[in-house]
Amino acid sequence: MAAQTARLEECIRQANAPGNLDGLLAHHILSRRRLSFDWDVNPLAPAWIADNEHRFAHSHGLAVLGYGLAGFSSTAASQAAARKHLTAGLPALMRKNPFQDDGVTFVNDPRQIIGLALAVNTMQDDIPQARTWLAEVLQDPKLRPANILLSLFQEHARRILGTTTAAVAVDACSIRDPVEAACIHWLTVSARDRRLADQDELRRLQSRLLSDILLADTGQPTAPRAALLLEATAQIVTASIDETLLSRTHVGVLLSRFEAAMRQWRYDGDDLDNPIKWPITSEREIQNILWLMLRPVFDDLVEEETLRRLGHSTYRADFGIPSLALLIEVKYARKAADFKTFEKEIYDDYIGYLAGNSPYRQMTVFIYDESASVQEHDTTRNALLKLPNITDVIIVSRPSHIPKPKRSPRRRSRNQQADGAPDA
């Protein structure tokens, strides 16, 4: 793995020069990744702009400026110079035929199409028609990408422009080129431009990709192709480590620390000049707290995950963590009798939650007990844990420094009011 990573980084390093289009696209793919060298592709240096003014009459030069403005910090003078050249060059480019007979055009160059998408986005306030023009070019029926990789980069450019469009129809399992598979992985995991059918399909893609990268001879790829392979390698290895370290058991450990964490939940006394009080009155507040606890650890945490319809019923779990195939159901107990009710509700929902709802196969239950009916906790926990796919049941009590909410009594019926009977 280390040898392959070093080889891919060396391919990228060869394009690591100011204004190099290969290097700029590689930086766009890997911008958040730490490499063994420092990036040196930023074109927005006054000297570089002055020495390359002849390039800005062409699409490749305008693409370079797009990468520069979108991806790098620079001086105000450099930004002003870049915007000046884009203001002059983009309208001229818009007057040209983007579908030349010889095929030598920016729409067939992934490096240029991404850079130009970044450029017209940056210049939206100054030249709003440029963004509309490029979006129309990328939707034109004459756009016929020569290969899957080009079609995927054109799709990414449409996403950059915010164009609502269906994903390019690609069967990830049928792809033979590791770079094309790596591009699908990048668009799915890093750029978040598309979704695979399910988590199992993503795992199959990752398994095949890692095997190809480690065992197949990918030759001497260009910097963008090497960047896609390197990004896929880093993402897959990181995901594998996360799956090892962050398990369903880890979810239970975090949730079991709820009571200790609530020590810092603010509910000041009235003796302060400006007391801060964070009331907890319903399940919604508990969901908010659990989100804050889990989201920093599990970046694929999903709130109110809508599940597959079963018969006449539609089911929605409070949280889902697809990478762990885990659903989390949250309950709020106001009185001791609620625990018996929860057991029945969870029994009823159990099959609906887990029947055919890939990728979810197991469930954790979290119950917040406002009434502090601790005598009920073990009974409910043991009953629910007998269900084979419930991995954990965490029951916590209301902290003593948070008062029990005051609720209005239910309205009496007309007969009760007439008879003077007490509220039920």
Image (cartoon, rainbow, N blue to C red):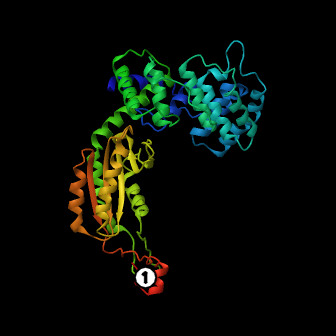
Residue occupying the far top of the picture: 102
46 relative to 95, above or below: below
User: Which amino acid lies under the numbered mark 1 shown in the image of this protein?
Assistant: Leu
279 and 405: which is toward the camera: 405
Rendered image quadrant of residue 57: top right
Quadrant (top left/top right/bottom left/bottom right) for the C terminus: bottom left
103 relative to 72, above or below: above
**Residue at x-position 31% and y-position 39%:** 243
Q: Is residue 95 rendered to the left or right of residue 374?
A: right
Q: Position of residue 225 (x, y in %)?
A: 49, 23
Residue under label 1, please give it: 272
Q: How many numbered circles are shown?
A: 1
Rendered image quadrant of residue 10: top left
Q: Position of residue 122 (x, y in %)?
A: 66, 40
Q: Secondary structure at mark 1?
A: loop
**Residue at x-position 42% and y-position 29%:** 232
Rendered image quadrant of residue 96: top right
Q: Position of residue 351 (x, y in %)?
A: 34, 45
Quadrant (top left/top right/bottom left/bottom right) for the N terminus: top left
Task: Sort mark 1 into few (<14), some (14-19) or many (20+) by Cα contacts within 10 Å.
Answer: few
**Residue at x-position 72% and y-position 44%:** 125
Residue occupying the far bottom of the picture: 420
Q: Is residue 194 visible?
A: yes
Q: Is residue 19 visible?
A: no
142 and 421: which is toward the camera: 421
Q: Is residue 209 rendered to the left or right of residue 137?
A: left
